[in-house]
Image (cartoon, rainbow, N blue to C red):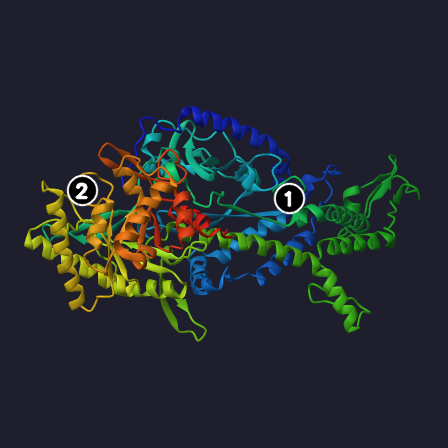
Amino acid sequence: MEVRTTGVPVIGERELRRAADILRRYKQGKQNLERRIIADEDWWKLRQWRQFSDKGNPNDDRPASGWLFNVIMGKHADAIAAYPGPVIRPREPDDRQEAQMLSSIIPCILEQNDFEEVYSDTCWQKMKQGTGVWGVYWDQDKLGGLGDIAIRPVNVLNLFWEPGVTDIQKSQNVFYLELEDNETLLAEYPQLAGKLGGSSAVLARYRTDDAVDLSEKTLVVDWYYKKRVGGRTVLHYCKYVGETVLYATENDTFVPSVTREARDPETGEMGFVQTPVRAPACERGLYDDGDYPFIFDRLFPIEGSVCGYGYIDIGKGAQEQIDRMDQAIVKNTIMAATPRWFRRSDGSVNEQEYADWTKPFVHVDGNLGQDSLQQVQVNMLPGICVQVLNNKIEELKWTTGNTDVTNGQVSSGVTAASAIAALQEASGRSSRASTQSAYRAYARLIRMVIERIRQFYDLPRRFRIAGLSGAEEFVSYCNARLKAQGLDCYEYQCGRGVHIGEDTARAIGRAAREAGIVTSLHAPYFINLSGADPARVEKNVEYILSSARACRWLEGDRIVVHCGGLSGMEREQALQNTLLNLRQALAALEQAGLSQVRLCVETMGKINVLGDAGEVIRICQADERLLPCIDFGHLNARTLGGIRSKADYAAILDRIGEALGDARARQFHVHFSRIEYSKGGEKRHWTFAETQFGPEPQPLMELLAERGLAPVIICESAGTQAEDAQTMQRMYCGRTFF
């Protein structure tokens, strides 16, 4: 795959200034929410008197009872007791095996992310401020650079979205801000030298902390935004500081690849080769599902907001009244326990001696009249005050659903089992509502984890799974086994050599068979069947044999091979050499007990190589075990756009049927993609979204369906193979997959 390069970055200083303007608007729209969350944190830390409008006499005691704190503790315990677990259900009967496998490995992924702790942290935020947020990312630094899924709690104070949206996914942009250590930033991004001078911006989250040194920190912005490209939503991402881009998907032309050990076909020496696994980020975006990696879990929804209210918001009114009543009771009690006296100004009583109860004598100057000293009478609070206090406590309990019954106690006088059950039912409603919202958010999280698996698990991963009996089982898994929304065929690529292990291949094969997926294998690209050198021919046969063995491990029965170049030969001579070498390869397959493997000879996209439609059909006429692999994108490229209509497709199918018979015409092999070409033929593969390149898939799919043909069709789009294959399947059979 060719790497596309761009002269000028798509995301530069101008785009960052535009992003900064958007972020300022988002911040303004979030001010009320931030003030509420910060105030709620004071209540959680029992500092609620700072939030009272009338704080009273500064010398008075300010008791802060923990009734509301206890509510949150109880609700958090309820949430942890209802900790969910993933159960993946199949969409169709054929998906059962895959669903079972995902149900086994996803708990391992969650455990690797300490998800119980992540879940707990998010629950605290949900109970306190009404909203908990999870982030589901792909962390390319995990597992020593192999990369893996990362799940983290997200502080909603650091997250910014379009004001007025009710779903985070409907925001045009999403920003996540964090203050990071300058030293760490410079180590990872040397281009920031001289641009880090501390941060003038203070995130709202730090206004809730007692003391944090921000002098050596800098504000880093993660900017997520969506674009519509070719009828699909592409999620792009940019990380920046000030007006310096640290990374941007739209600027990233690198083609991700998998590095495998391989033997050089010429020298026989071992080395490493890279196999492209997906399109560059500038074309594909950050995540294939097109969603922001954030999942909101709301407690009590707020109309017109992605956030909700928490227990502090609904209970702080009663808690304030409780605290004020406690203050009044404490103040009255202290006044009653601390006698005070009126003293006439002309009554010369020694106040120090009078106040000191250890002194037996109190000196008085002059006559001591009865009215010279009089105790101040303190009226005790009426009993109704205590009743009001208790009523407010009960109000708080019932408002938040944290009653005595919920906590395992029963009110006096309630003895009937039905009455107790009714009380438990009533008090548990808010907890159930919270649990249900958490489960909905959890389901969205699991779906996002599956999407990360689908996109990034290109190589088999080993998972240790504990069975019901306690026995440990090791399972190998990769996204090749994840059935993509009704797709039912898969071609394993060995273009740089056959390096798949037998155990891994057999595991994939079993899963494919059980899921109804037909497998095939693409033999190494360095096979050259048109050559005449005996040593090279022998190597070609070895490559075909190793490909066939791997194909059988995968439970497939066809491998795709290239004819090879002309190397200065006449086309007819190259064709005759190919026929001779293929006969030798077929004989070797039969001798090795692999005669059931069919060789699919592929049409090629370069004009100066062997493999136009006529040549491939002539080759396949030599033996029933040979099938044509018709790459329509290649044929369109080498004919410089020769496939323009349904009739052009029909002419190719007619030639196959006439030359090879109905059986092979019905079940031939197909590769399809849009391909850019130059005067020499094929240049590069593209996706279905790039409609400026041909050929068009719709006429071919209609024609195949009309004629009742059922070839194996492999999509070779640049990074969107699953999506584009699904499109072709809908064109062919008229199904719409969920």
Name which residue lies at 77% across and 51% down. Answer: 357
Q: What residue does disc 1 label?
A: 40
Would residue 669 be visible to someone looking at this image?
A: yes
Q: Which mark is residue 137?
A: none
Residue extending furthest toward the front: 658
Query: In this rendering, would 407 be left or right of 706?
Result: right
Q: What residue does disc 2 label?
A: 609
Element class at badge 1? helix
Name which residue lies at 80% across and 68% down. Answer: 412
Q: As shown in the figure, which amino acid type bears the numbered disc 1?
A: Asp
Q: Residues within 10 Å of mark 1 (few under 14, many from 20)?
A: many
Q: Quadrant of the N terminus?
A: top left
Query: In this rendering, would 40 be left or right of 595?
Result: right
Q: Nearer the viewer, residue 284 or 127?
A: 284
Q: Is residue 559 above or below residue 290?
A: below
Name which residue lies at 17% across and 51% down. Answer: 527
Q: Which of the 4 image quadrants contains residue 698?
A: top left
Q: As shown in the figure, which amino acid type bears the numbered disc 2?
A: Val
x, y percent for residue 205: 54, 39
Q: CA distance from mark 2 to mark 1?
A: 72 Å
x, y percent for residue 151: 46, 51
Q: Residues within 10 Å of mark 2 (few under 14, many from 20)?
A: some
How many badges with numbers are in the image? 2
Element class at badge 2? loop
